[in-house]
Image: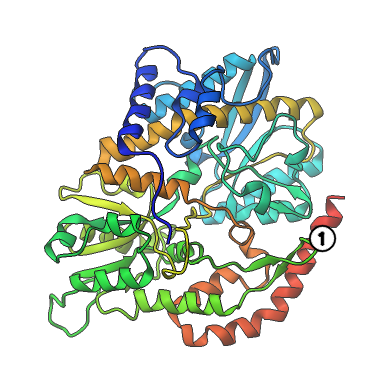
Amino acid sequence: MKKLTGITAAAFALAIATLLAACSGGGQQPAGDTQPPGSTTEAETVTETTTKYADNLPDDLDFDGGEVRVLYREANVEEFYIPEATGEIVDDAINDSIREVEERLNLKVAVTPRIGTAYSDRLKYNDHIAQNVLAGDDVYEWCDIMADMLRISVGQGVLADLQKVPYLEPDKPWYTAGLTEEGILGGGLWCLLGDFSLGYLRDTFCLYFNKTLTEAYGVDDLYKTVEGGDWTIDRAAEVSKKAASDVNGDGIIDLEDKLGFVLRDNYHLCGFMTCTDVNYYSRDSAGGWQYTYGSEHDIKAVTKVHSLLRGTPGNYLFEGTRTSSANQEVYNSIASKFMAGEVMIMTAQMNDAVTDLRNMESDYGILPFPKLDEAQEDYITSSRTTHSAMVMPLICSEKGREIAGAFIEALAAKNHGTVIPAYFELALKTKYSRDNESTVMYDLIHDSTRLSFSYLYAQIATKSPTELFIAGCKEPDKFASSLAAAHEANKASFDQYIKSVEEINK
């Protein structure tokens, strides 16, 4: 089985020190000098440090004060654009990155925030982009949309194929791994995912564990378990049940009691879809995508997840979600119980530590979601599909595509070497890291992120494969029959969608 590899915590600290020197006025550092841990080989790093910038843009590129117009969801815009320095290390890194790219390429960035994150506003936000395209109004070069809504815009035929945009190199390390292999639909690449913003990283799935509890119950070092490749669903069940206790004596272990492993949000089950290597779609012999959900592997995955969350006494699956105001009280109470030492392990998204756990007094650590079993070679991580996907309207002009391509390429490369390490510094060292091992775990989670076509385009099929997976994790005995009942309709709707995208974008 594969063990954890990558740079050491000391090397990470050195990279952060270099970044902080630049942020404090110690001189502008080349992007190649501040690569986040594990992102390049030693040979690549040597090559990059001999050039001023990590990207391959021409040194004399000059857009003569041209403008890049960006539409961004209002509630998320600070992950991409900070209009002025605030004194916060991450904010200032984002601001500095934008300003440096503006100066370097002699262009200006104009960001238009628009309501589009709340569930009721998502369709209106996407429709705004489509209406501009259909009306022939060339008003944006780039538009941020929620990744889960990408399929709608693609199906409307209102997006540009980013393979045809100058200067973009989506196989570079500042874009999400797998983008050029798994992100192609109908022959086109319709979005970018990566370090142009913090959105993907902030929504990355992870686990937090209460170190006080693991020590009190004699749990072996979980960092070493991960490093040895042994952090599996069965191991998580074995560990977590040690913390279960029926505090109120009613014969039921629930949110009123002490718990071992808690799924904090219904849609954190999507993280289990990824970590167990479940795929709804696969390639046929000609390289095209086909609907193939329902293998023995898929059935094993939901059975394992159910055994952890509902088959292990003292573990709890919360069926609400943070995106619903009706669920907020319980959602917040789970974090409170974790901080109070009443939950050993809880599912989370990376930024939860910044927003929810910053005042936790006892020590805690971070882990990746577990493997399906020991036969699975690698840990696999994904983000929640509420994150940003950057798209380009179809009617963007030739000149607009040129300036937009250069801008986003330069920004993503710059952020890769400065903003991403700055976020780690805030998250790991300032807010909640209590040990050097946490630094290594964050590196592992970041580096094990894998994009799959099934993740990005899950909802193409009529009967949501994601909802089938979630239901299967709760009632595995019904999973096979549910898959069988939905198979023909899902296969037909998927095939029709692929065909329509191919026709629209000929």
Q: Which residue is labeled 1 in the image?
A: 500
The residue at the point 15 percent across, 50 percent down is 362
Residue at x-position 42% and y-position 70%? 373
How many callouts does the rendering have?
1
Looking at the rendered structure, the secondary structure element under dot 1 is: helix
With 236 as the anchor, is 375 left or right in this view?
Answer: right
Which of the pair 313/136 is nearer the observer? 313
Q: Is residue 425 left or right of residue 488?
A: left
Res 413 quadrant in image: top right
- At which x and y percent is residue 233? 37, 70
Which residue appears at 57% of the width and 25% of the height?
A: 54
Can the viewer see residue 82 in this picture?
no
Please say if 353 is above or below 140. Answer: below
- Label 1: few (<14), some or many (≥20) within 10 Å? some
Give amino acid for label 1: Ser
Question: Whole-percent x and y of residue 29?
Answer: 45, 17
Q: Is residue 462 above or below residue 152?
A: below
Q: Position of residue 284 (x, y in %)?
A: 75, 67
For residue 276, above or below residue 430? below
Name the residue rendered at 23%, 43% in the picture.
435
Quadrant location of the N terminus in the rendered image? bottom left
The reply to whether residue 42 is visible in this rendering is yes
Residue 226 vs residue 402, the one in the foreground: 226
Q: Position of residue 222 (x, y in %)?
A: 27, 58
Image quadrant in which you'd find residue 26: top left
Q: Is 398 displayed left or right of 382 in the figure?
A: right
